[in-house]
Amino acid sequence: MPIPVIIDCDPGTDDAVALLLAFASPELSVLAVTVAGGNAGLHCTLPNALALTALANSPTPVHAGADRPLLGRFRSEPGVHGDDGLGGVKLPPGGQPAPGLAADVIRSLLRSHPEPLTLIGIGPATNLAIALATEPALAKKVARIVLMSGSREAGNVTPEAEFNAWSDPEALSILLDAGRPVVFATLELTAQALVTPARIAAWRARGSGSCLQAACDIQASVPPSPRFGRRGAPLHDPCAVAWLIRPDLFTVRPCSVRVDLGPGPGRGRTLFDPGGRTGDPPNATVLETLDADGFFELLGQRLANLP
Ligand code: BDR
Ligand code: CA
């Protein structure tokens, strides 16, 4: 039976590939896509999610969500994702957002679905946190929360904080306190998923479908990261989705995790304690290693199966 999931996202060059991977994968049943502002403003991320869903010919409803974090002001990431969130790659426009706002729809699906649902969070965690904070009893209907979030060492937006965790740390803290299993694809994991020109070329050679070619164009727009000697850029968000599809490509470790909610320069950094030094019981699972060749092969196969 496919795993029923809700994907909360902020497309986003890497969110785009994560969504296409999910739509192409029979292991998952995507009940809804909910969207927040993040990599770009909601006025861009929402049409991007709609366009990607239409391009994949997916019937999945797409819902608008938060355009800002729970606290503080909204900040986007144009240096990586361009002003429009997709690196300037133009897709045919999608349809209209489905009725209902993200947090309401998440709660409604949790309430009504016969099985517990898996929540996949690959943007700022605002929508998921509002849903769970406004009806905490629904946490028992959450099978697990799988996040691209956090870093164990260096950050990518401040010296210590990863973008999604930093964008809405209070929301991440609410998810960590929900009492459900949380799985983290951190920056250390996604650093193992470098998109290089050679990997894009290998995808391109797999076919002429619109989704495959759009994924290649979008990835080609991402500036190579100085963190990796400009060899390529990490493909963060598809790691979280791929773990649900092919957990055999990963190794994992239980861990306790907290997020820094202070106002200072450490705000949004995640504190992973795999050795148990804090005395906190493990509240999360951290994805530690990735079979990168297997991951890119999976993506190439699945993207090539889409329209
Ligand atoms: C995360 O932040 C965004 O820029 C990406 O889409 C990813 O979700 C990586 O830090
Ligand atoms: Ca994202």
Image (cartoon, helix red, strand yellow):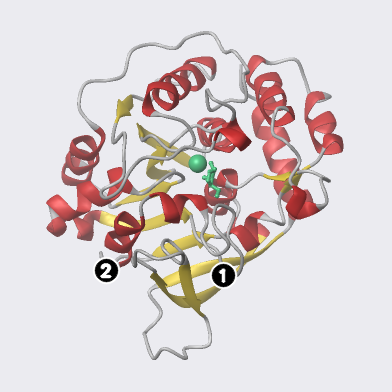
Q: CA distance from mark 1 to mark 2?
A: 21 Å
Q: Name the one closer to the observer, 214 or 22.
A: 214
Q: Above or below — where is 201 with respect to 149?
A: above
Quarter of the rendered image showing ligand 1: top right
Upstream in the sequence, badge 1 or badge 2? 1
**Amino acid on which disc 1 is placed:** Arg
Q: Is residue 203 visible?
A: yes
Mark 2 Cβ and ligand 1 under 8 Å apart: no
Q: What residue is rendered at 70% in x and 48% in y?
A: 295
Residue that protrudes farthest toward the top in the picture? 92
Q: Residue 284, percent across and down?
A: 42, 70
- Numbered mark located on residue 179 in the image: 2
User: Circle 1 sits on which residue?
Assistant: 152
Q: What residue is rendered at 22% in x and 58% in y?
A: 139
Q: Quadrant of the N terminus?
A: top left
Q: Residue 190, percent across and down?
A: 64, 54
Q: Residue 160, percent across and down?
A: 54, 64
Q: Is residue 289 left or right of residue 73?
A: right
Neighbour class for label 1 at 10 Å: few (<14), some, many (≥20)?
many
Neighbour class for label 2 at 10 Å: few (<14), some, many (≥20)?
some
Q: What residue is rendered at 39% in x and 24% in y?
A: 46
Q: Is residue 275 left or right of residue 220?
A: left
Q: Name the one closer to the observer, 262 or 81.
A: 262
Q: Is residue 237 left or right of residue 304?
A: left
